[in-house]
Amino acid sequence: MKPGIHPDYKEATISCACGVAYPTQSTRGSFSVDVCSACHPFFTGKQRMMDTAGRVERFRKKYENLPAGGAQLSSKKEKAAKRASKKAADGEN
């Protein structure tokens, strides 16, 4: 390796928002991250449901009236008919 052309490779600490700190080496220095292998759902097997702009409520509202088996309407015509009847019912009120 040529001398003088490589950046300094010094001790650094990577700290996670969950409180875990990993000692390592880096040219960037120490920094923090939001998610690490100690708290990421893929590695822990625990899943956290994060609600972003009401998406969870919208999803639940959309699928709350489906039959318990998860059966969905079988054809596009049935879906369109259901939407049309719902619009008509909303328009009458």
Image (tube, rainbow, N blue to C red):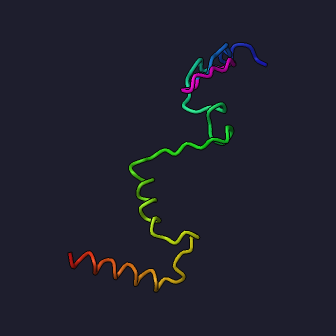
At x 40%, y 84%, the residue is: 81
The one nearer the camera, 64 or 80, is 64
Q: Which residues are magenta?
A: 16-26
- Please name the predominant secondary structure of the magenta segment in the image: strand
Q: Is residue 59 above or below residue 47?
A: below
Q: Position of residue 4 (x, y in %)?
A: 69, 13
Q: Residue shown at 52%/72% (left/top)? A: 67
In percent of the image, x 67 and y 42: which residue is there? 45
User: Going by the picture, which residue comes out furthest to the left?
Assistant: 93
**Residue 19 vs residue 10: left or right?**
left
**Left/right of residue 56 with respect to residue 28 in the rendered view:** left
* Residue 28 point in image, percent of width and height: 60, 21
Q: Is residue 33 above or below residue 44?
A: above
Q: Position of residue 15 (x, y in %)?
A: 59, 22
The answer to whether residue 58 of the structure is visible from this angle is yes
Quadrant into which the C terminus falls: bottom left
Give the side of residue 91 with respect to residue 50, left or right: left
Question: Measured along the vertical axis of the image, is residue 7 above or below residue 45?
Answer: above
Q: Quadrant of the N terminus?
A: top right
Q: Residue at x 66, y 21 (%)?
A: 22
Query: Residue pushed farthest front?
Result: 68
Q: Quadrant of residue 17?
A: top right
The total number of labels drawn is 0
Seen in the picture, residue 86 relative to 47 is either above or below; the reply is: below
Q: Is residue 84 magenta?
A: no
